[in-house]
Image (spheres, coloured by chain):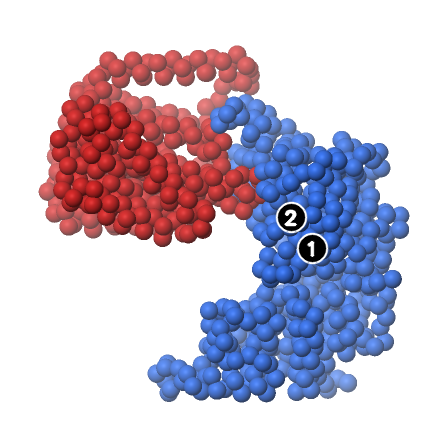
Amino acid sequence: MSSGKKIFQSELIKKYGNLIGLITLIILTAFLTKGTFITPRNLINVLRQTSVNGILAVGMTLVILIGGIDLSVGSVVALTGIFAALFQPLGTVPAIVLTVLIGAVIGGWNGFFVTKFKIPPFIITLGMMTIARGLALVFSGGQAISGLNEKFILISESYISPTVFFSVLAFLTLIAAICFLRKMKNGQFKEGFKISPISAINAFFMLAALTLISWLVIFRGLPMGAAIFFVIAMIGIYVLRRMRFGRYVYAVGGNEEAARLSGINVKLIKFLVFTIMGVLAAVAGIVLTARLNSGVPTSGVMFELDAIASVVIGGTSLSGGHGSIGGSIIGAFIIGTLNNGMQLLNIDSFYQEIVKGAIIIGAVLLDRKK
Amino acid sequence: MESNVLLETRNIIKDFPGVRALDKVSFCLNEGEVLGLVGENGAGKSTLMKIFSGAYPAGSYQGEIYLKGNRCAFKSPKDSQSAGIAIIYQELNLIPKMSAAENIFLGREPVIGKTGLIKEEELFRQTQDLLDTLDISVSADEMIENLSIGKQQMVEIAKAVSCRAKILILDEPTSALTEQEIRSLFKMIKSLGARGVSMIYISHKLDEIFEITNRVSVLRDGRTVGGKETSRMSRQELVALMVGRNIEDMYPKEKVSIGKTALEVKDFFVDHPFLTGEKVVRNVNFQVRSGEVLGIYGLMGSGRSELLNAIFGSFSADSSGEVYLEGKHVRINSPHQAIEEGIGLVTEDRKLFGLVLGMEVGENISLSCLEDISWYQVINKQKEDELIERYTRSLKIKTAGSKAIVNNLSGGNQQKVVIAKWLATNPRVLLLDEPTRGVDVAAKVEIYQLMNKLAKEGVAIVMVSSDLPEVLSMSDRLLIMHEGQAIKELDKEEATQEKVMFYATGGKE
């Protein structure tokens, strides 16, 4: 019985280690900043600052799940940001569509080289990192491009009003309730409705997060960038858990040869994953450009490392096949809290880098111990 | 006689989880002789060699090894090497991007004092002298990757000689060699014999055993079952020693009515994955009817797995020939196409090719048939759960639940998961590659019963197996492969272990 309890405990640490880390970090930062950190105004700031990295982390989770890596995302964020700024005269919607398309082409290019010529992702995306950065400087003439459409800036600067937010929430709750009732009708809970401890804990944390966000929303509304991040993350979670493509991503990362012999088109899956990463990098580029109110060719430096760090801290295995977007979201908020907290504490940015690096190494070490 | 025994083992016992690989092996190698070591796949030859090489260190097995009458214990490959034992493996152990000289003296380079600086000139001169005295036409500065497999093997032998090896073990040395290269290898073996090197020659090719060895020793099921001077041994006698295993009462083969031809393979050739111009399967023709079990038997390197994989569209090299499914000509270029045509392949080595070990039992079972239970991309969870439940139950897969990670299951249950995955695709033709390897007896019987059930349902089964009694008992018909060719087809009634082994080792009427 006690050994069963022990297994359960280690299971808990394994599953919730990063979440416990995030909560500890938030409490610690709140104390050190004498409460400034947990004011609604600052928390909304954290949400806004985290959204770009969060969007990238969702794509990076897929890339790392298939055993790959994408070092080019930071540069691609800058390049697509420049294009988004250059496309402004075409109108806001065409600018967004074209920019996303360019992101898809760049990601597809990476995927093409990885699958067709069997070039290691590390190498091809390292090359693309430099190429995209160079292109960003060429197309912008090395200058920030300002003069964006008013509507475009709203992508980052507007807020989703409490009314809209709670309507959507109510709608989603309704759908969930209908699904539940249909399952009950189909007799899926004949043997009684059982809640496993894990799903109870999951539900608790979800509710807690929702409560926190609702509080922020009542205060000011949900920042648009964060809303985009949450929607993308939810779609990502659904794709990985409920769709064939998601299942194949895990299979390819877990055992590529077995996946191939099971009839999975391994090359297509890899190609698509890199393409999706490119698309998400473009979305991040659009959000960042709107926030900076200009296309900046030198922006996005080291963003790939923050994204990779979020994924790794979130418990996704660098060798592929194991991990989740949920973990990466937590990882992204850990990075976001660190960045924000150290800014509030006026820690020299030189030291910020050191602390971040140490935390990444520590997270991986903890992961090994499991 | 006692005085010239060079290497001797007494009562070697080596256990692996669930199997006894070596069971009191006593074996001796005399000074200056070439000893042939033969046995079926899995008879224990490789295990014994790994004990000699120190790959299985002293202490991981029971029994004693004597070298020139002195007891010795090899704790590592280094111990065994310094005792004068060298092994030439099937897969050569050379570094492709280094020269012959650098490979031969790897770790023993002539250096200037204690500086660690290599005396390049001396290295190449010593190597060239060595290669010349051994009559090997390779230049010391030639890069290994530019040499043919035969030449590479010669470099390995030169390395062994330069290490002053007294005992040279050759493990299937001719499997990747051309006829001409085999000739020069045999010349080399004879000249090494004259230099006083004793050799153990492992091969499935009995022609070679009769040509090159002085004495032959037979392993079967981890035991030495006999041996004598090659000149006093007949081919039939040797084959009888190699097989002769008891057919236990564990093969519940049932008669089922056999239907129309399900799979027909015509003029099938498969290229060698890295030797251009060479073929691993040559001109194979066969057919299987629905409800029939066709057994394919062949020793290592006979091309049996390559044949199955090429039919399934999963082999790395090109193939040619025609495949007909129920009379319809099909072209299969990928496993996905094969699955759509109704072919399943239960691959050899479930850990490498069969399972995604880190995924759940259920996810592995449904992996190949997700298209059937999805609405576009969205997996129908309910249908999936039902499917998993059905196969877990009908195959009696013992697991903590469909959410258990497949890596935590026993070998037999893992194998059942692989089979379940393929049954879930509703195949008309099921190809089984070593379906019971590494599986405990109870699970084996269950797999045989499952084969019966599938045959009754009209599935055509092709089974490749190294287990002679199994393949004899479970097949309706038997195809024997040797060096890429299907050299003989036997009906269940006429097939005996001796006959099958006779053909599988290259015997001709």
Which residue is under mark 2?
A: B310
View extreme (front): residue: A90
Q: In the rendered image, which quarter is residue B138 located in? A: bottom right
Chain letter for red?
Answer: A
Element on which disc 2 rests: helix
Which residue is under mark 1?
A: B281
Q: Residue at x 39, y 49 (%)?
A: A121
Element on which disc 1 rests: strand
Q: Residue at x 22, y 31 (%)?
A: A87
Compared across the picture, whether A264 is left or right of B120 comes to: right
Compared across the picture, whether B13 is left or right of B54 comes to: right
Q: Residue A236: where, in percent of width, then height?
A: 38, 31
Q: Residue A82: where, in percent of width, then height?
A: 21, 38
Disc 1 crowd, CA 10 A, few/some/many (<14, 14-19, 20+): many
Q: Residue at x 28, y 33 (%)?
A: A99
- Residue B398 appears in the figure: no
Image marks 2 and 1: residues in contact by CB distance under 8 Å = yes
What amino acid does circle 2 point to?
A: Ala
Q: In the rendered image, which quarter is residue A138 located in? A: top left
* Closer to the camera in the image, B457 or B125: B125
Viewport quadrant of the C terminus of chain B: bottom right
- The subunit letter for the residue under badge 1 reads B
Chain letter for blue?
Answer: B
Q: Residue A70: where, in percent of width, then height?
A: 34, 45
Q: Residue B391: where, in percent of width, then height?
A: 64, 31
